[in-house]
Image (cartoon, rainbow, N blue to C red):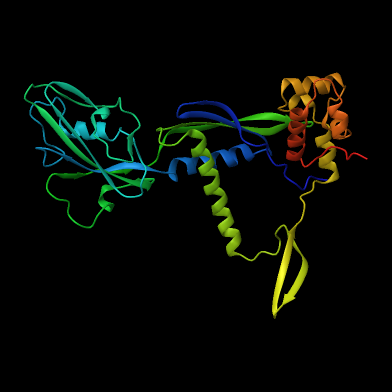
Amino acid sequence: MFHQNIVLPKKLNVVQEEGSKGIYEIEGLYPGYGHTLGNSLRRIILSSLPGVSITSVKIKDAEHEFATLNGVKEDVLSILLNLKKVRFSLATEEEAVVTLSVKGNKEVTAADFDTVGGVEVMNPEQYIAEVTAKTGSLDIELTLAKGIGFVSKEDFTDNKPSVGTILVDAIFSPIRKVNYEVEHMRVGDRTDYNLLRVNLETDGSITAKEALEQSLHIMINQFRSILDLKHIEESNTVLNNTVEEEGIVRVEQTVEEETIDEEERVELLKTRIDTLDFSSRTEKSLNEASIRTLGGLVQKTADDLLDLDGFGQKSLEEVEETLTTFKLHLKDSK
């Protein structure tokens, strides 16, 4: 008999988090699902997360992007390229304006912006330009907005911008980089299950974990919308009760419990304890009690496990959570 159910993966595991960077793993993915899920997540992370970008720039004494400024080392085009690297966080949904004004010899960075309430510079160390003359100055005004993805400057407005206003292409994505790796792992006797590792770095306006979780929600909502628009009877619900009240027929539904076939269950029960993500303390207690597979584990009750040396309530919760992942459970106490 062939398998007819796809085993669900384990919950998201945080491998490393440092500042705006994070590495996350999802274990126990059905063979092939590492790339299926990893590629979809990567595309959503890069294209669909909201962020903040500069939409227009005003620089004093610069009427267009090809101008030069007296007493400033960089031309306007170079300054614009540096400004695009500055990342902002915006607390409101409305557009915001931030300014910068520098006079005299100075290396200008993003820290020199005079931000208004609700605006924060995420990388204040970012270099912008250098004023090289004592009498030189640099005055900049930026317009910030929230959005998604990439928007060309031609799409901002139907009206011609005022003289001195330079429109720039907006890159709203808060993601600096994202990549994923897929490795094989053992589940039962099979060694071709997938482990998905996602490596993320944001601009600091959101954390790496928030970016990953938002992307998962976007993916789920897309599929949910498709299912909700089609009245498919082959869903995981069955009609089990009908109540008539004042001419209204009210149908109550219950969700069928997901089950696994017997052959798949046999395979899962062969899974060795040392291949699972148990803490060293839990694994040691189980090994000392000669419990080395999921099959041996499900023969025990909660009370049996709590009687083991070094096995406490935390270990019990860990075991029950892992068994739930595989749609298994401990033996019921009599």
Residue 305 screen position, x and y as percent: 85, 29
Residue at image coords 75%, 20%: 281
The number of discs equals 0
In this rendering, is residue 134 above or below 148? above
- Depth check: give the residue in front, 195 or 19: 19
State the image quarter where residue 113 is shown.
Answer: top left
Residue extending furthest toward the bottom: 247
Residue at image coords 72%, 69%: 251
Residue 325 screen position, x and y as percent: 73, 39
Residue at image coords 72%, 57%: 236
In this rendering, is residue 18 above or below 167? above
- Depth check: give the residue in front, 277 or 76: 277
State the image quarter where residue 328 is shown.
Answer: top right
* Left or right position of 133 against 190: left
Residue at image coords 57%, 50%: 220
Instruction: Locate the C terminus and report the quarter of the image it occupies.
Output: top right
In this rendering, is residue 72 above or below 49? above
